[in-house]
Amino acid sequence: MIVRILLALGIVLAIGAGYIYYTGGRQLPPVVMERLRFLPTRQTAGALQLPTDSIAAVEVPTLPENASEQLKTVGERTGELSSTVGKVLGEAVQVGTASGEQSLQERAFDYGRYLYCQQVVKDYEARTTPR
């Protein structure tokens, strides 16, 4: 698999190197360039005007005046939410274990153990069954 990938990569590199060597690094033929419109050509690259002070041209948005108050409110509500969720989940877990039911993790572990034992029995029967 890796050999095929390396071989394909080598062929692509050989074709590219051959093209550059035999054309002297000239541009691709016009037929190919029409299909590759997203690549900048020499004419369009010269027409692009990039700002010299690109960092100075960037406008940084400012925060609203009451941003700290809003963040404080969001923090308080997040604390209330986490405590409420903790209470609800705590009660749900206590109800499940108090009523004699197994928790989800215990049932999943028991089911995994059952599947493992079932597979061991099948393997044993397959080895010891007379043919």
Image (tube, rainbow, N blue to C red):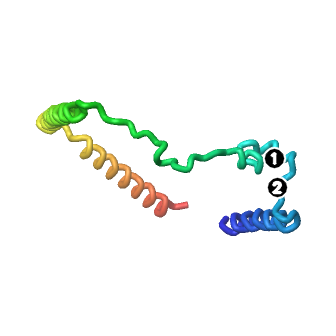
Separation of marks 1 and 2 at Cα, in angstroms? 9 Å
- Residue 70, horizontal then vertical, whole percent: 22, 31
- Seen in the picture, residue 110 relative to 130 is either above or below; the reply is above
| Residue corresponding to mark 1 | 33
Residue 83: quarter of image: top left
Q: Identify which residue is drawn at 40% across, 40% down.
A: 60
Decide if residue 109 is on the left or right side of residue 46.
Answer: left
- Residue 1, horizontal then vertical, whole percent: 67, 65
Note whether residue 92 is visible: no
Residue neighbourhood size for the residue with mark 2, other residues' Cα within 10 Å, grouped as few (<14), some (14–19), many (≥20): few
Q: Identify which residue is drawn at 30% across, 45% down.
A: 108
Residue neighbourhood size for the residue with mark 1, other residues' Cα within 10 Å, grouped as few (<14), some (14–19), many (≥20): some
Q: The C terminus is located in which quarter? A: bottom right
Q: Nearer the viewer, residue 54 or 70?
A: 54
Three-letter code for the amino acid on which mark 2 is drawn? Gln
| Residue corresponding to mark 2 | 27
Between disc 1 and disc 2, whose residue precedes? 2
CB-based contact (under 8 Å), mark 1 and mark 2 = yes
